[in-house]
Amino acid sequence: MDPSWTHRQRPERLERRITFDDYEPTRRFLERLEQLSAAETRYPDISFGRTYVNLTVRPLQDDGPVEADDQAFAARIDALIDEPTDG
């Protein structure tokens, strides 16, 4: 998992802000994230603007601790950032 993720307490969660140069790479990242989330039936909390995406990954178990599965999901999100894009 990328060290850019922050492990927060009360409630436990992982948070990350990803910045982009412009809207187009932001949009492409969000599309890849949607595909990953649909495939895994797991959806992070998302807020975004033209050049950034804020993500929160909550544990699979409500009120549970952040575990290896949560960190693995965050790592799969990280892999989307550098994924080649069309155009």
Image (cartoon, helix red, strand yellow):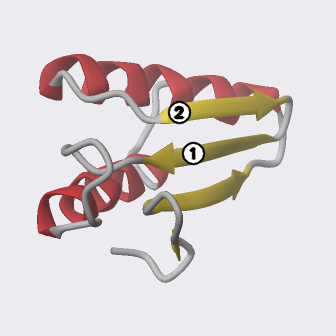
Q: CA distance from mark 1 to mark 2?
A: 6 Å
Farthest residue to the bottom: give it. Answer: 3
Instruction: Locate residue 48, reporting x and y percent.
Output: 75, 31
Instruction: Locate residue 27, reporting x and y percent.
Output: 64, 23
* Left or right side of 83 for 68: left
Instruction: Locate residue 40, reporting x and y percent.
Output: 15, 28
Residue to which mark 2 is pinned: 45
Q: Are marks 1 and 2 in contact (CB under 8 Å)?
A: yes
Placement of the N terminus among the 4 image quadrants: bottom left
Q: Which mark is residue 55?
A: 1
Return the residue nearer the eye: 35 or 67.
Answer: 67
Q: Upstream in the sequence, badge 1 or badge 2?
A: 2
Residue positioned 56% across, 59% down in the render? 15
Label 2 sits on a secondary structure element that is: strand
Question: In the image, what residue type sits under mark 2?
Answer: Asp
Placement of the C terminus among the 4 image quadrants: top right
64 up-or-down from 4: above or below = above
Camera sees residue 61: yes
Label 1 sits on a secondary structure element that is: strand
Question: In the image, what residue type sits under mark 1?
Answer: Leu
